[in-house]
Amino acid sequence: MEKLRCPHCNAMNQDVEATDNCWQCGNRLGAAQDGPVATLKQVQAKPGLEERVAKRKEERKNDGTALSLAMVVIMLLILTIIVIFIMRGHW
């Protein structure tokens, strides 16, 4: 028995023959691809390691930007309140 890659979902199947079914999609490993269905499944493949790392870095960058923006808004609000109290003579 050997390792075979499914022509439908691109999953690796271990200790199988061409007459067996794929563990992930259930289609026969020796069967040819079914045109649009197989193409759709290949398009929806999981992203690679580099793509996931780049996505996480972008999410972290966006989180840091949102946090910095929130801190600036809070500081401006506090500064505005202090200026209003000083102008009214309550300080």
Image (cartoon, rainbow, N blue to C red):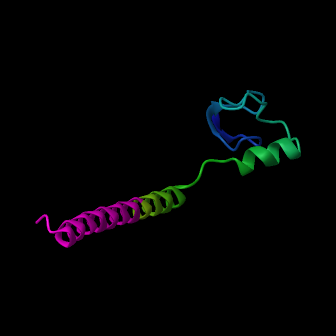
The magenta-colored residue range is 63-91
Residue 62 position in % (x across, y down): 44, 62
Residue 15 position in % (x across, y down): 61, 31
Q: Would residue 33 be visible to someone looking at this image? A: no
Q: Looking at the image, is 27 positioned above or below residue 44?
A: above
| Left or right: 81, with 27 as reference point | left
Tell which residue pokes out farthest to the front in this image: 88
| Left or right: 8, with 79 as reference point | right
Depth check: 70 or 36 in front? 70
Residue drawn 20% across the image and 68% down it: 88
Residue drawn 27% across the image and 68% down it: 80
Residue 69 within the magenta-colored segment of the rendering: yes
Q: Main secondary structure of the magenta part?
A: helix
Tell which residue pokes out farthest to the right in this image: 35
Depth check: 81 or 32 in front? 81
Depth check: 28 or 2 in front? 28
Quadrant containing the N terminus is top right
Q: Looking at the image, is 29 positioned above or below residue 59?
A: above
Residue 85 within the magenta-colored segment of the rendering: yes
Residue drawn 37% across the image and 65% down it: 69
